[in-house]
Image (cartoon, rainbow, N blue to C red):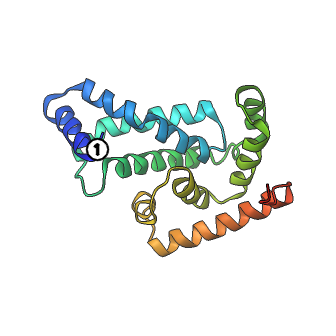
Amino acid sequence: MNPLDDIGLIAQVVALGNTRAFGKLVEKYQQPVRRFLLNLTCGDGPLSDDLAQDTFVKAYVSLASFKNLAGFSTWLFRIAYNVFYDYLRSHKETSALDAREIDQYQRTHQPNVGEQMDIYHALALLKEIERSCITLFYMEDQSIEKIAAITGLPTGTVKSHLSRAKEKMATYLKQHGYDGKK
């Protein structure tokens, strides 16, 4: 499906109230949005699912305001990004992401547990904005310009966050036995 297909589906939803057309958009983007949120939450699957659902609900409600200034995927990732930060702000007083809960979930539900946990632990060391930038760049294959559009940051700031995040993750992973040699 190309971007023109997305526009056609959006038009069907907005003009005709065709919920099946929105369902096609959800099918296309649910895995990338969930993966993005899974990385932001450092592997918390149930939380990622809840945030992804909130993202699609907000996207559906706001679809008429989509102006196609950026691609639909950029707009949708911006909503997911905002949903995640709204969640963090509303739960800041309780606690940060609980690594013990993430560890328990990962141990019982995921293949390659050790490697994934090391990545999630490295991601957890990053500031939220650094984690967002590195997740969008390396795991969602978004360009610097799209990351800037999603986060609302200047491209130079995105590059700085990527550089710092990469360095922090590399240091953590080297300390935990990943030396880059095979």
Q: Amino acid at mark 1?
A: Asn
Quadrant of the snapshot with the C terminus: bottom right
Q: Who's the residue at 80% across and 59% down the image?
A: 181
Residue 63 position, x and y percent, is 26, 41
Q: Is residue 11 left or right of residue 19?
A: left
Residue 101 position, x and y percent, is 75, 34
Q: Quadrant of residue 7?
A: top left
Q: Who's the residue at 70% across and 68% down the image?
A: 167
Q: Who's the residue at 72% across and 60% down the image?
A: 169
Callout 1: few (<14), some (14-19), or many (20+) C-alpha neighbours within 10 Å?
few
Q: Is residue 50 left or right of residue 16?
A: right
Quadrant of the snapshot with the N terminus: top left
Q: Quadrant of residue 133?
A: bottom right
Q: Who's the residue at 49% across and 54% down the image?
A: 141
Helix, strand or loop at mark 1: loop
Q: In this rendering, is residue 159 above or below 71? A: below
Q: In this rendering, is residue 17 above or below 140? A: above
Residue receiving disc 1:
2
Instruction: Residue at the far front: name it.
Output: 182
Residue 46 position, x and y percent, is 60, 30
Question: How many marks can you see?
Answer: 1
Residue 72 position, x and y percent, is 31, 47
Q: Is residue 159 left or right of residue 111?
A: left
Q: In this rendering, is residue 163 above or below 101? A: below
